[in-house]
Image (cartoon, rainbow, N blue to C red):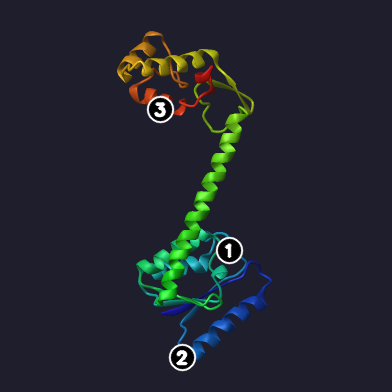
Amino acid sequence: MIVSIVRTSTNKQDESIKSQINMIQKYCDLKEIHLDQHFVDEGVSGGSLKNRDQFNDLMDLVKDNKIDTIICVSLSRISRNTLDLLKFVQTLQDTDTNLVVLKENIDLKTPMGKFFVSILGSIYDLERNLISERTKDILNNKKDHNKVYCGNTPYGYDRNGDRLVENPTEIRMIKKVHTLRNQDKSYGEIVKFLKRNKYTTKKGDFFGKNNVKSLLNTTKNHPCLSL
């Protein structure tokens, strides 16, 4: 089957639907292509593929290897979300389904189409890295200002509203654990020391070797170590 995808963001864009279908039909007439069906999602956002009934019906056919080619006017008619778009294209590649996009002049069967896929993947990687960097910056800023930056209260602090205040007992314990480790004490020896002195995790459990390793790693840049 050769089909098309048509989408509008509101129910009042009848002309947009007609315009997209007309443009696709003209392309098919020019290329002498018989179009079997239009899949039209009317009044749905391009930001997500979750509530796209017609789109999801189409993807079921794609996964059943019943679609040869999908034609659309623009990539924005499929999705405005880079990750969704990348997953969509990867599914088409896995099922050997072609995609033709008129405005962007994309055809997955051509070298330029394959280049487009590589660019799409690179754009997604860039977006993901930028988001990761922004998230790190926000977390670091919160840490620097002693604000809550995660669901769990980090060891060495107590939560007071949306702020973190140092817990003197836990701070002393953190310093002692690092001192013992710097003295080449084993994780087992450190665990014994903590049990002997009745130090517990935030959940009230005794420390195990993995807890100690995690504590050393997460607190290695703790301000208390330079006091």
Q: Can residue 148 be seen? A: no
Q: Nearer the viewer, residue 43 or 150?
A: 150
Q: Is residue 27 above or below residue 190?
A: below
Instruction: Compute the Cα span from label 3 to label 1.
Output: 42 Å
Q: Is residue 52 above or below residue 126?
A: below
Q: Earlier in the sequence, mark 3 or mark 2?
A: 2
70 sits left or right of 209 in the view = right
Q: Determine which residue is flagged by label 3.
A: 214
Considering the numbered disc 3 on the image, is that residue within a helix, a strand or a loop? helix
Front position among marks 3 and 2? 3
13 sits left or right of 204 in the view = right
Amino acid at pointer 3: Ser
Q: x%, y% of residue 103?
A: 56, 77
Q: Earlier in the sequence, mark 1 or mark 2?
A: 2
Determine the residue positioned at 57% across, 40% down. 137
Q: Determine which residue is flagged by label 1.
A: 46
- Residue, far right: 12
Determine the residue positioned at 43% across, 24% down. 215
Q: Which quadrant of the rendered structure holds the C terminus?
A: top right
Q: Which numbered circle lies on residue 164? A: none
Amino acid at pointer 2: Glu
**Quick one: label 3, few (<14), some, or many (20+) residues within 10 Å?**
few
Q: x%, y% of residue 68?
A: 39, 77
Q: Determine which residue is flagged by label 2.
A: 32
- Which quarter of the picture shows residue 87? bottom left
76 sits left or right of 97 in the view = right
